[in-house]
Image: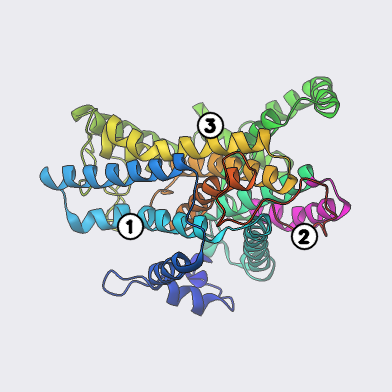
């Protein structure tokens, strides 16, 4: 799998493993089988108590999925194509269940943060090494527009926020050093991977993180510093807008999404968005249903030879979900995300333990990055994105219990005392 991601020009030690895990055998994916086996094992000895709001919300989401799937089939949709539309999201719901069942204590939450952080670092290092050793020496006709999968953007940015939130909440020397050490390889990976959505997601995430942080003297000083630097920031944006090179690459890359600076990719997205909105107009309440193609009233560049399913799997997968499910179906699906964000917001404001506050903030930022990815590319149908979304959903079912914001059942491990603990600063929540 890695070999394909790096333009087929490089393999890593994990390439055989990832290829075996995600290869489809008669609609069966080994990764899915592994998730289901782990889920079955977890049910035997794990706490089954979860926040009631999440349990109810999950049932509504499943009902909405089943209802919109049936609606599509009744209206001539293809069950075969609906498999590709819904498979990864459904497995993401199973993964969320697995997270709910395996997070017993605050240490488990901390371990999950370390897993995300280390996965981010691994992917960043492999991307950086590929660029240093191979990509920069490729002849011009073989140059790659991007080095890894588009959805690695979610892992890079959300993983980077794990390091940042870890440092902000713990404020230990170890956590700060971990952030400093991770910044170089992760930022380099974002730069060389050349995905403009990463810059947008990181910028929006920083704004949301700033809003979430409680009012303090430090926050007040930061606001005044930003006001003082506003002329310099404005000059940087003005100079870099439309000029995605050198130090101006972040703002320049974002500018290619809008107005007169739009590139062909952005214009094709606009055409697709128009077609999806026209599809929604056929039935704004119920949608088209799954297993059907969106209505292509305006034809863009023909990509059917390289991507024959493009009308089943639109790049703007978030707007695609709206077109296929309608207003009622979309609410049924996405209320789970809204409930998840609300629960994490409550934990962040009320929890006393820094690990729980950090996990809640990281989960909100993770969802922010995911929503932008789903708007900009095929996130709803991508394994990486659905797994990352599952982590936030699963955490939402357990964090309020660990923070004692809901009565904690006897079968669950009690939350630790809220006294500061000396941490090693290892990456994690």
Return the mark for residue 87.
1
Q: Position of residue 337 (x, y in %)?
A: 46, 39
Q: In this picture, which residue range is highlighted in magenta?
A: 170-191
In the rendered image, which residue does mark 2 sit on?
426
Q: Is residue 237 left or right of residue 320?
A: right
Q: Position of residue 389 (x, y in %)?
A: 49, 49
* Residue ranking furthest to the front: 410
Foreground of the two, 65 or 18: 65
Q: Is residue 35 left or right of residue 345?
A: left
Foreground of the two, 139 or 210: 210
Callout in the foreground (2, 3): 2
Q: Is residue 130 left or right of residue 371?
A: right
Cβ atoms at labels 1 and 3 below 8 Å apart? no
SS of the residue at dot 2?
Answer: loop
In the rendered image, which residue does mark 3 sit on?
261
Number of other residues with Cα within 10 Å of mark 2, as a class: few under 14, some 14 to 19, many 20 or more? many
Mark found first going from the N terminus, 2 or 1: 1
Callout in the foreground (1, 3): 1
Q: Is residue 72 above or below residue 345?
A: below
């Amino acid at each position: 799998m890695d070999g394909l991601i790096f333009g087929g020009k490089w393999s890593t030690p994990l390439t055989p493993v990832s290829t075996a895990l995600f290869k489809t055998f008669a609609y069966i994916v080994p990764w899915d089988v592994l998730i289901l086996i782990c889920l079955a094992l977890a049910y035997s000895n794990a706490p089954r108590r979860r926040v009631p709001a999440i349990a109810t919300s999950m049932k509504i989401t499943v009902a909405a999925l089943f209802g919109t799937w049936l609606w599509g089939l009744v209206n001539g949709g293809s069950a075969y194509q609906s498999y590709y539309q819904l498979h990864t999201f459904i497995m993401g719901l199973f993964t969320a269940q697995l997270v709910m069942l395996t997070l017993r204590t605050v240490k488990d939450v901390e371990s999950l943060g370390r897993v995300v952080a280390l996965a981010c670092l691994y992917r960043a290092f492999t991307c950086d090494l590929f660029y240093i050793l191979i990509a920069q020496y490729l002849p011009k006709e073989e140059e790659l527009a991007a080095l890894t999968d588009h959805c690695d953007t979610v892992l890079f940015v959300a993983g980077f926020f794990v390091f940042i939130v870890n440092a902000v909440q713990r404020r230990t020397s170890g956590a700060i050093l971990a952030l400093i050490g991770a910044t170089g390889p992760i930022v380099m990976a974002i730069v060389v991977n050349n995905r403009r959505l990463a810059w947008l997601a990181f910028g929006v995430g920083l704004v949301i993180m700033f809003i979430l942080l409680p009012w303090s003297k430090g926050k007040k000083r930061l606001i005044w510093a930003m006001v003082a630097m506003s002329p310099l920031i404005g000059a940087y944006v003005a100079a870099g807008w439309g000029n995605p090179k050198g130090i101006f690459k972040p703002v320049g890359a974002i500018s290619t999404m809008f107005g007169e600076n739009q590139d062909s990719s952005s214009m094709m997205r606009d055409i697709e968005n128009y077609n999806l909105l026209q599809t929604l107009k056929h039935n704004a309440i119920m949608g088209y249903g799954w297993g059907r193609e969106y209505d292509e009233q305006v034809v863009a560049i023909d990509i059917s030879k390289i991507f024959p399913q493009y009308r089943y799997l639109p790049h703007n997968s978030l707007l695609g979900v709206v077109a296929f499910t309608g207003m009622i179906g979309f609410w049924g699906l996405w209320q789970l995300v809204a409930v998840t964000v609300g629960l994490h917001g409550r934990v962040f404001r009320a929890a006393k333990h820094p690990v729980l506050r950090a996990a809640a903030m990281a989960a909100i930022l993770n969802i922010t990055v995911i929503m932008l990815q789903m708007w900009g590319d095929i996130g709803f149908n991508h394994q990486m994105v659905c797994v990352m979304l599952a982590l936030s959903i699963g955490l939402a079912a357990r964090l309020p219990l660990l923070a004692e914001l809901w009565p904690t059942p006897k079968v669950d491990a009690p939350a630790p005392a809220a006294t500061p603990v000396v941490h090693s600063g290892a990456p994690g929540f």
